[in-house]
Image (cartoon, rainbow, N blue to C red):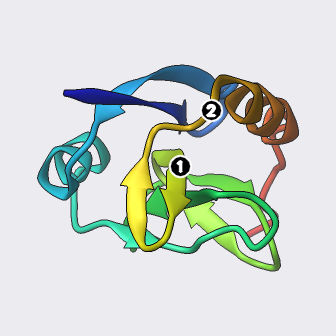
Amino acid sequence: MNMRGIVIDPGKAPEICKLPNDSQGLERWLGGPVHMRPFGQHPAAPLHTNAAGQDLPNRHYLDRWYYGRLIIVGYKNCRLMPLPQELAEQLAEQFAPVEVARL
């Protein structure tokens, strides 16, 4: 079974797509162990790996750079869930601008 989420690759626009709905499937999508940092204002969370130094900078959010592939899924009551379509569109637009890291 799949769930709606957003995939954001470095230098590319966010894409709303179907993602695996379990942690093992998400780890395969990201290419490593999944780390999560829930948004405070939305029932959603970005998932990422700790691959800094190995991957390209992707997006900057809340005083932090995310590297490599980033995915955003629904998150509520400590459970991963599909993003509602309206929220997926809103977050895809919010993360559309690509920032350039000054290294």
- The answer to whether residue 35 is above or below residue 73 is below
Amino acid type, label 2: Pro
CA gap between label 1 and label 2 equals 8 Å
Q: Nearer the viewer, residue 35 or 98?
A: 35
Q: Which kind of residue does numbered mark 1 sit on?
A: Gly
Crowd tier of the residue under label 2, counting other residues whose Cα lies within 10 Å: few below 14, some 14–19, many 20 or above: some
Above or below for 14 versus 101: above
Q: Residue at x 46, y 71 (%)?
A: 36
| Residue 67 left/right relative to 96 | left
Toward which corner of the image does residue 95 lie, by quadrant?
top right
Whether the residues at callouts 1 and 2 have beta carbons within 8 Å, the answer is: yes
Residue 34 lies left or right of residue 60; in this view the side is left
Q: Position of residue 31 (x, y in %)?
A: 23, 51
Say which residue label 1 marks. 74
In which quadrant is the N terminus drawn?
top left
When asked about the image quadrant of residue 45, the answer is bottom right
Q: Residue at x 21, y 57 (%)?
A: 23
Residue position marked by numbered label 2 in the rendering: 84
Q: Tell me: 98 left or right of 57.
A: right
Circle 2: element type: loop
Between 88 and 96, the residue placed more toward the observer is 88
**Rendered residue at 53%/49% (across/down):** 74
